[in-house]
Image: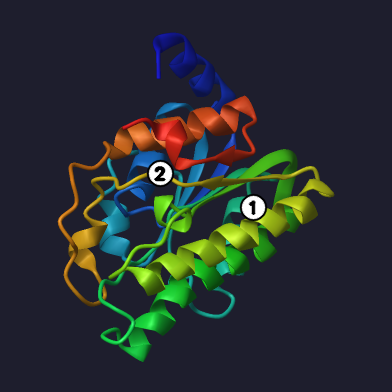
Amino acid sequence: MGNDAGMATTLAFAGANVLVAGATGGLGSRFVAQLAHAGAHVTAVGRDPERLAMLDVDLAQAIALDLRLPNACASAVHTAASRGPIDLLVNATGVVAFGTVSELSIDAMEELFLTNVFVPIMLSQAALPAMAQGGTIVHISGVIAEQNLPGMVTYGASKAALRSFQEGFAREARRHKVRVLDSRPPHTETGLAGRALEGDAPKFGPGLDPDGVVATILEAVSNGAKDLPSTAFGT
């Protein structure tokens, strides 16, 4: 992103009320940092209070919640909305597992869909009434949602389900003047592959810089994009 685009993006988020879920992850922490630097009022949500405290920004609000639990998504939204209508919700939660369908445990399958599908749906459900008109909800399905791969089939299916959800939810959200942006970046160096629920990651080539991926997504938000395919990130 060039200097002019970077300046425009910074101005777009100055004073914005933003909720970032998965705030301590490889992408989530970058969203928090870039949005805070742009002057946004950020509510950061993550499971681990110690990791939240390590975020390299001066946050006004940080809340430790396990969003998989009943009512946790509603609690996160309530905290962010205490400042007023939410201008931007970024969901950067996500887990991965590797292995063929015959190898993967039922527990891993359930966790993939709970975190990668149900949490985004619950966040969206809770957030929609609290969103500002003209606000944006961002979920990250990733390039795997465009083309599934052997050894990642169940993970890919969870991300494809998220993409499908967003396609329909975007039409519902328009009635509330809220935009839903599906983001599908290629493999990014977040460290997620090394924290798999099960299995060993295949040999990936060098991934994208997470700061650049986040900057691309935020630029798309500020430009009013309605879809962000893998080709929008370059290689």
Place of residue 91 in the rendered image (x, y in percent of width and height, measured from the top left): 49, 54
21 left or right of 108 in image: right
* Furthest residue in direction top, as rendered: 4
- Between circles 2 and 1, the one closer to the viewer is 2
Instruction: Give percent across and percent down for residue 97.
Output: 29, 72
Residue 67 vertical placement versus 85 (above, below): below
Q: Tag 2's secondary structure?
A: loop
Of residues 47 and 165, the one drawn nearer to the viewer in this rendering: 165
Front-most of residues 209 and 222? 209
Disc 1 marks which amino acid? Answer: Ser
Determine the secondary structure under disc 1: loop
Please give the count of numbered marks on the rendered protein: 2
Q: Can residue 25 be seen in this view?
A: yes
Cα–Cα gap, marks 2 and 1: 32 Å
Determine crowd level at label 2: few under 14, some 14-19, many 20+ residues with C-alpha closer than 10 A: many
- Quarter assignment of residue 62: bottom left
In the rendering, at what x and y percent does residue 198 appear? 23, 77
User: Residue 36, can we see it?
Assistant: no
| Residue in the image at 31% along x and 66% along y | 48
| Amino acid type of the residue tagged 2 in the rendering | Pro
Quarter location, residue 72: bottom right
Instruction: In this rendered view, identify the residue nearer to me: 23 or 114.
Output: 114
Q: In which quarter of the image is the N terminus?
A: top left
Up-down: is 228 above or below 15? below
Q: Which residue is drawn at 40% across and 44% down?
A: 185
Identify residue for label 1: 82
Classed neighbour count for the residue bearing mark 1: other residues with Cα under 10 Å, few (<14), some (14–19), many (≥20) = few
Give the residue at mark 2. 185
Residue 140: x %, y % from top left: 47, 52
